[in-house]
Structure formats: C-alpha cells, structure tokens
Image: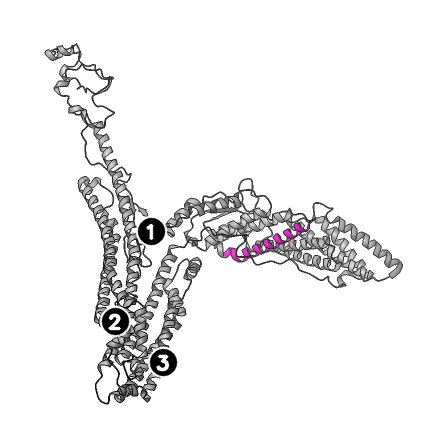
Amino acid sequence: MADILSVPLKKTSEIDLVKPLKNLIALRFSTADNPENFNDAISELNKLRSLACLRALDKNESSIEINARYCDQLAALEGKIPPQDVQIPFKWKDAFDKGSLFSGKMSLTITSFSYERMCCLFNLAAFQSQVATVQSQESDEGLKLAAKLLQSASGIFSYLKANVMGALQQEPTPDLNPEVLGTLSSLMLAEAQEIFVIKAINDKMKEAIIAKLASQCEEFYAETLKMMKQPATTSVWERDWNSKVTGKQLAYHAIAQYYQSRVCNSRKAVGEEIARLQDAIENFKSAQQRFSDVTTYQDYFNKAQKALAEAQKDNDFIYHERVPDVKNLDPVGKAPLAKTPVMPERLGASFKDLFEGLTPVVVHQAMAAWDVRKMEIVNVEVGRMREANQMLNGVLASLNLPAALEESAGESLPQSLKDKARAVRQSGGIDILKELIGNLPSLLERNKEILDEAERLLTEERQSDDQLKSQFKERWSRTPSVKLTEAFTSNIAKYRQILANASNADNVVKGKFESHRRGIELLSRPEGELETAVPSASQSAADNSRSPAAAQLRLLMSQVNDLKSEREVLEHELKSAMVDMKQVFLGALTQDGAVNEPAMSVEKLGQVYGPLQKRIRESIDFQANLIQQIQTLNEDFVKDKLGGKGPSAREELLKELATAHDIHMEVQNNLQEGAKFYNDLTQLLLSFQCKISDFCFARKAEKEELLKDLTSSYANNSSSSAPPTEVPGYHTTQAAREVPARPPPPNFSSANASASAPPTSSAPGAPPATSASPVNPNMAPGQSGANPYLPYPMQPYGGMPMPMHMPMQYGYPTGAPPTYDYANQAQYPPQQQPQQQGAPGYPGYNNAYQYPYHNPAYPYAPPRPY
C-alpha cells in the first residue's frame, strides 16, 4: 500500500463576521432608497466559516464540499467588496510550523477577504490530500477518488502559487511562499501518478504500460525532490518528507525497471532483463533505507530477486548473453496520466451566491449615471428623428403630396388621404384626443395633492418642533426640524417645478389640437361624409397627375416611405440596445478600488450608440437633399397643373387634412406619454410622501420620549427638593404622628382640647408646638410630611397633585441627543449632520428619493413647431 503524504492544515482563530459585515453593508452598500438587508446571508456565512475552518471534519467528500462552498462564497464576496473596506482581522497560522516552548506557531493577520480565501484554498487542497490518504487502495472506487482529489489539490496549489502574492501584497508565512506552493503542487501530481500505477497493477494491465506509468511517476518525484531542496523551501518540510520523497523516487525507478524486465523476458532479451532486475534490486534496497518501515516495497523486492535468479539460471545454462551496463540501456518510456488541472471558477458541486443582490453604492451611483447618459443619447437621437419626420411631413403637407399625385376626375378622394383618414379613425379619432386631454387636469391635480400633503406633514412637524423649542428653550436640545428637512423641502420645490413644466407642456399640446381641430374632426368622419366635404377634382388635375414630373415625384415619395421605415427601425434599435454595465463597474471596482464612470460610460456609449448616431446623421442629410428635389419637381408639377392659376379650394382642404393627420398622431402620442409621465410621477410622489410620513412619525416618537424624560426628571427633582407644604388650619385638629429619626413631636391633648385651647407650654426639651412638622392627613403612620409615593406635594381640596410643566436638561451624556438622519437612515453625533446637497436622483448624491431624468429631449417635452 502506497504511503500518501498529506499536507497539514492551517489553523485559524474564531472571528465574528456578523457585526463587521452588517456595519460594512449598512455604511457602504445601503441607501435610503435602496436599503440592503443581508442579515440571514451574513449569519449563514459565519456558520459556514465555523464549519469549514474551526471544526474537525470527517475525512470524506461531504467535508470537502463544506470547504469548497466557503471558498466559493469568499470568491463571490471578494468581487463585490473592495479590499480596503474590509476591517476584519483574519489570523492564520503556518501549516508546517510546529512552534516552540517559548513562542507559538508562526502566524499572519491581514484584514482582507483575499487573504482569507487564499488560506481557505490552501486548506481545501490540504484536506483533499488527507481524504485521499484514507481511501482504500484495494478498491477501484477508492483509487479513482484518491487520484481525482490529488489532481484537484495540485491544481489549487498551482493557482495559489500564481496568485498569492498579488492577493496578499506583503510577505506571507512560509507555507504560502510561491516556491513552497509550487512544490506542493508537484508533490500532489506525483502522488496522483502513483495512484494510477497502483490501479494499473491491480487491474493487471500490460507490463509495458505499468513500466511507463512508473517511470513517469519516478520523474514526477524527482522534480518534486529537486524543488524541495531549494534554499527557500528546504526548512519548511516535515522532518521525514525528504526521505520519503527520495525513497519514492528510488522505488518507482525500481518498479519501472522491474516491469520493463518482464517485457524483456517476453522478448527473450535475457541480458537486458538481468541488467534491469539488478538495477531494480539495488534501488529497492536504497528506497527501503529511506523509510522507517524497512519492509516497504518488500513484495516487489522479493519478486525482483526471484525473477533475477531465474533469469541468471536461464542465461547460464541456455542463452549465455552478455549483461549490458544499465546506463547503456534505452530509458523506459513515460506515460503521464496525472495532470495539473486549471482550478475551476466554482469549486463546490452546487453554488448559490448568498450575496447575489449585493452591489456597492458606488456601482449603484455609476449605474444611475450610466442610465442618465444612455437615456440622454436615446432621447436626443429619437427627438432628432421625430423632428426630421415632422419637418418632412410639414413640407409634404404644404405641397399636398402625395395626394396631388393621386387626383382623378370626380369626387373620389386620393388613396393616401383615405389611408390617413382610416388611420385616424382606427386610433380613436377626435374622441380619443378629447378623452386624453380631459384626463390631464385630474392627473395633474392628483400629483399636486400628494405633494401638498407631504408639505403639510413637514410644516406641522416643523411648527410643533418650533413651539416646543420656544417653550423649553435650551433644554429642547434635539436637532431642529428645519435642518433635517432641507433635502425634503428642496425636493418638494423641484417637484413643483416639474409639475409646472408639465402643465405648460399640456397647454402647448392643447393649443396644437385646437388649431387643427377642424381637420381632425373631418378625418374622424366616415369615408362617405369625408368625400362629401371635399370638393371634386377637375379633369385637368387628373390629366396632370400623369405628367413626367408626377412620375418623378412618385419615385421620390417611395423614397420618403423608405426613409420613414428606416427611422422606425433605428428608433427601435436605440431603445432596445442593452449593455450590462453592472459587471463592468464591479470589475473596475474590484481591480482598481474605484469606478471612473464618466470615462467608462463615454467609451461604452460610443461603442454601442456611435454606429446608430452615424446612420441617423446620414438619414437627416439624405432627407435635406430629398426635400430639395421634391420642391424642385413640385414647382414644375404645379405649373403644368394650374397654368398660372392659384390653388383650388380642394387642394387647400387636402393640405389641411394631411396636416391634421400628422398633428393627430403627434398629439395622441404626446398625450399618451403625458399620461404615463403623470402616473409614473404619482408613484414616485407616493414613495416620497411615505418617506416624509416615516420621518414625521419617527420625530413624533422622539418628541414624546423627550417630553416624557423632561417631565419625569423635573418632577423627581421637585419632589426631592421642594419644601414641605403648609397644612391648612382645619387639618391641625388631628393628632400628630411620630416621625422616625427626628426629634419627638410636641405632646397634644385630645382633639377637642386642641381645638378649644392651644397649648402654651410643652415638655422639657421639646420644641415649641408651633414648630411641629405639618401633618398630611393622607400619610400612613411613620411617614414624613413629604409623601415619597407621590411625585408632587399634596395639595388641598382632596389631596390632588398639581401638574408641573417645567423644563429640564435631556439626559444624554453629551448634553444633547444624537441626531438621526431620517432621510438617509443614518445617525450622527450632535452638530455633525452631513450637508444635504445635489438634485434628487442625481448620481453621486445620497438623497431621499429619485425622479425621472427630465431634459429638453424628454419624450414628453413640448412639441416643436415645423
């Protein structure tokens, strides 16, 4: 049975990951608009670390999976949290250092997830080697698993060798030295090849194959031994490792020679057979001296001796071949079955990222800025195309094209006009425009009411705070509402400006509708009524529609249709272009520790939208030439048709109807976008109002708690320091009661005697009767004049306490309570509140809410004139 060398594990100490990670995520990754709660994930990660790093695990595949899962979680987390943000001290001890009597084992502490992952990967590979050692070498499954684990360990050690220095950025412990890791990778590879040799022997494969496998194993061990003797690594290894590796190299050289001698025996090459057997026996003897158990490889040694005796006997009596020098023999071939694999991205069998939704705040801000830049380009380019289309439609409508080319004698309408009228009727006609326009005031008013209510809540809270401040003066020490609500107030003003701009846009759209109302109404009628309303065409006009100029204009109209279709495709491509910038920003944050959003966004926008912008420019340039050609040909067409006469009433109405069709489509699109804008804004305002409501509720709870503390503290001070209350005269008829630890009270006679004649003298040494403590009729025997069970001194008229509203200092150690930033969900010491700044939703600022980007190119911007 092969003696597999297993790598010892690194040891670590217990660390609480929960609190540091909670604080880190709350500070770095959460915003008021996007709070992050990963408490369950953090607890799961903490449990996983305890299982993988602190507990003694059974040596089986399930335990390997636990280690692999923890390594996978660290790899995922490492890509999301910049190294400089981690303040968790990970302490790991050297795996090979045994320590000394006066000093513990060598250790290294680094606050980095990268260091933690490197150490856990080391342990994963080491544990795989330990599991490989306990596998049965008599079973096929045990050998397969051992070979698999040893090759995997070799790949992990090789990965560590290439990446450990970049991850640590400082000198590691000796076990993480790249030379040591390279040696361990080579050792695991040699042992994996050894398993293949054992399996080939168990499977009774051909002697030539076994010899090649063993020869390759000997070469792997020779490389490992050479690396172990490097000056940087020689002091690291276990005391007996050098001897064992040397012994394995000699033993597998001997095994290769033995099985190659069997090949020679089958070829009747007795002289070569004897030379190889003699070399094998010498190497078996040398190998046994390297092991503490001198019987190691004894079975092979015995077989070689027996085979040598038989070969020498046959050679002496039969073959009489000369025995060559073993150095002159051809070397045994090699068959490297064991490989050092590339470490996979995920080591566990099943991986679920516990922090899948975790995105750094800087990436959130970068994504928001990217969206703004992207939408700005999309809106500007779409606006340019729509403006170009409006200009083209206006020119064609002013020239009565293409309707003038479709004229025929009689009352029939041009086909293009019929199509436009059908499109208007199918979209809802004038009724849908009236309905949409009628809905705008209610949508606008609803948003105004929500904003008014939010402002009312802030005003009431501020007034209540100001009132209590004026009442309690300096004792009312919490942060004034006016300071905490600066961001809310600023955003309310900006929202009101947005609503004012939207209202102006509504008026522009309404004005455009009213100016073309007659034409839209005609197009909304049935086709028969529309034909009746349009004057008949003359025969000359019908003949002129077949002129050469008309034919060329028809070709140009075909190009116009193609141009509009191309722009529809371009608009769709602009709006549907998708780029996953989140991964790009995360990669930059992990690599550089920062995100240069402007440079990265501009570069990516150029790559994605640059070709589309070029096509749009070419389309607009082509349109300018196209319009010039249309106007030139139309002049010839009109001259032929009119013969110097002015345009007819039919032509004027057809132009008006063509323009009305374009205006109908434009206004309907604007109204639909306006309704969507108002509905989206409603959701944002409701969220904004909820934030203000939460802020006011929290301030109210804080106010009530502060009032309670102020009142109760003052009441306690008053009850302990106030002088005893004078007792009314009608209470003096009651007998006085003794008060412990005080001079005895004066002696009174019975109640009747006291009432008829006050005493003029007292017992010797007693104080005068008039100086006795006043007696409270509600006191129990033995109580003093001030009742300790009542917060206020007793008053006459039934003994009811009189409320006292006096200020006191709020009971915080610093003299002022900490301030809670309700808009941004953060707590600050007194007088250290952050300055609120920036427009709501603008990237780079942590405001209470966001609203859609609004610029002149926004889809619901006021339509531009022709």
- Give the number of the disc on residue 32: 1
Q: Which residue is identified by label 2? A: 520
Q: Residue furthest right?
A: 317
Residue 863 horizontal/vertical position (percent): 26, 69
How far, Cα to Cα, is label 2 from label 1?
A: 49 Å
Q: Which residue is identified by label 3? A: 558
Q: Nearer the viewer, mark 3 or mark 2?
A: 2
- Between residue 378 and residue 305, name the one nearer to us: 378
Mark 1 is on which residue type? Ala
- Give the number of the disc on residue 632: none
Q: Is residue 229 visible?
A: no
Q: Nearer the viewer, mark 1 or mark 3?
A: 3
| Magenta-drawn segment | 138-165
How far, Cα to Cα, is label 3 from label 2?
A: 25 Å
Q: Secondary structure at mark 3?
A: helix
| Magenta span contains residue 153 | yes
Q: Residues within 10 Å of mark 3 (few under 14, many from 20)?
A: few
